[in-house]
Image (spheres, rainbow, N blue to C red):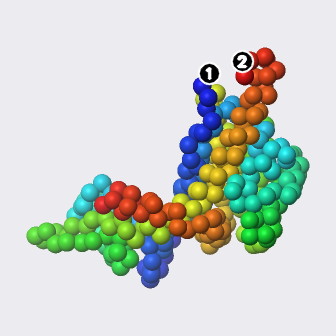
Amino acid sequence: MVAATSSGTAVVTLPTDTQILITREFGAPKHLVYRAWTTPELIKRWWTGDRGEATIAEVDLRVGGAWRYVMVANGGFEVAFHGEYLEIIPNERIVSTEVFEGMPDAEAVNTVTFTEKDGRTTLRLLVQHTSQEHRDAQINYGMEGGMQEAMDHLEQVAVSLR
Amino acid sequence: MARAPTTADAFNAVAEPRRRQILDVLAGGERPVNDLVMLLGLAQPLVSKHLRVLREVGLVDVRGDGRQRVYRLNGLPLKPIYDWVKNYERSWSQRFDRLDVVLEELKEMEDGDGGSDK
């Protein structure tokens, strides 16, 4: 039995001016990844990462149904997202809209796909924004986590590109 | 798809797909303009225009080699972009690390039904 706990880090790329693509492999079959991705009490356990405590995870998993996640971030402020499901293929693919409630004009369309091979699942999350400005704002938001740590990689980048 | 060449920083400079392509080519080593024109299949004036933008933000350096101008990549101005994406990536990695834990539990629950060794 292979004890596949950690499966590496998320890889983020910017395929076009208005997109973000997040890819990650998991050591579990796709029906479990799908379950963790869509079940409120499980979402609450992972969705906030290290950034806060999830207080609400509402999932009406049907086309036209709504979702809403709320967390209290470590700084004590509330952060909320919501959207609507546009397409659902169980264990395969979910397309939904996403709005950060602090920036309600910037609606993105998220397409998440689950691909299984040898019992492992590759998750691909494509975030399609309506403008580059909105996409960049989302990444900026993700940046609040802490700027300094990325300094480690300075040498690496500079060297690899020379 | 004309984009104003008035570009002040690396973020804007690499927002143009053709300029990213130029950087990709130069990542493999320095090249004279003619090579870039051929590899990209663009008209020389257009390539020169993109190179000028990249040079203004310090992403490429140029040197004369006889009659040729040879361009090479300078990665340093990409650092803020790298940092920016990297931090976003970090917050997703933290989420996914927690998702790993949830998945292990789900797997054990499924295994448990079949009476496994754990």
Secondary structure category for the residue under label 1: loop
Three-letter amino acid code at disc 1?
A: Met
Look at the numbered discs 1 and 2 and tell me whether their residues touch, using CB distance below 8 Å: yes
Q: Between residues A75 and B38, which one lies in front from this camera angle?
A: A75
Q: Residue B29: x percent and y percent?
A: 26, 57
Viewed as shown, does residue B60 lie left or right of B32? right
Image mark 1: chain:
A
Report if residue A64 is visible in the image. Answer: no
Q: Between residues A5 and B41, which one lies in front from this camera angle?
A: A5
Q: Residue B6: x percent and y percent?
A: 44, 83
Viewed as shown, does residue A158 lie left or right of B82? left
Three-letter amino acid code at disc 2?
A: Asp
Viewed as shown, does residue B93 lie left or right of B29? right
Neighbours of disc 2 within 10 Å: few (<14), some (14-19), many (20+): few
From what the image shows, is residue A75 above or below residue A93?
Answer: below
> Residue under circle 2?
B117
Residue depicted at 60% across the width and 39% down the height: A6
Q: Residue A18: x percent and y percent?
A: 60, 64
From what the image shows, is residue A146 above or below residue A3?
Answer: below
From what the image shows, is residue A79 above or below residue A41?
Answer: below
Looking at the rendered structure, which numbered label has been put on residue A68? none
> Residue under circle 1?
A1
Residue depicted at 74% across the width and 40% down the height: B102
What is the quadrant of residue B110 in the picture? Answer: top right
Residue depicted at 42% across the width and 63% down the height: A154
Report if residue B32 is visible in the image. Answer: yes
